[in-house]
Image (spheres, grey):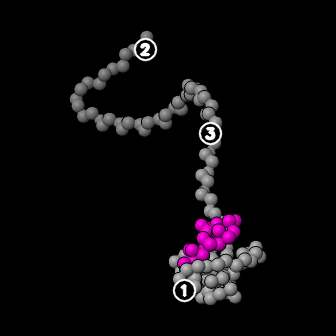
Amino acid sequence: MKVTVKTLKGGKFVIDVVGGNDGADASIGEVKKIIEIANPELPAANMKLIKSGKILKDTDTVGSAGIAGPTDFLVCMIAKVKKPPTPAPPAPAPPPAAPVAAPAASVAAPAAPAAPAAAPAAATTSAAPVEAAPPA
């Protein structure tokens, strides 16, 4: 069976699909290989074939896709190869830290005065008062 193939760049060519039932039993995967042989710039691995706006699966057959002869056509689209994501460049190393000088002797701020201690309770002993020594 003769099948017309159109490319997205405006090219048009005819391929001959062979197989059972006058080519109607050929799979779309086989058609892709035939197209690649006819036009090596169209790799089958990246190829998508479209019929009436529907992307055809490789397992579909020419007959199930509704292709009956040269008046029907397939649109051949080549998908762009996806590049693997490139890893982000490593972050630049931080510059070496400047040497830290020994801390200067710190003068401690005087501590807040402590609260006055509680006055001793008045002694109730009968001890004699201690006299203060005379000034010298």
Classify 13 as above or below 43. below
Place residue 11 in its image quadrant: bottom right
Q: Is residue 57 left or right of residue 38?
A: left
- How packed mark 1 is, by other alpha carbons closer than 10 Å (few <14, some 14-19, many 20 or more), is few
Q: Which residue lies furthest to the right in this view?
A: 10
Task: From the image, tell me which residue sits under label 1.
Answer: 21
In the rendered image, which quarter is residue 84 located in? bottom right
Say which amino acid is labelled 1.
Asn
Please rate how many residues cluster around mark 3, counting C-alpha atoms within 10 Å: few if below 14, some from 14 to 19, many from 20: few
Q: Which of marks 2 and 3 is in front?
A: 3
Label annotation for residue 135: 2
From the top left corner, tell me how far across and down residue 111 is, in percent. Answer: 49, 34
Q: Which residue is the site of mark 3?
A: 94
Decide which of tag 3 and tag 1 comes sooner along the chain: 1
Above or below, 37 relative to 135: below
Q: Residue at x 58, y 85 (%)?
A: 22
Q: What stretch is highlighted in magenta?
A: 26-46
The three-letter code of the residue at mark 2 reads: Pro
Mark 3 or 1: the one toward you: 1
Residue 133 in view: yes
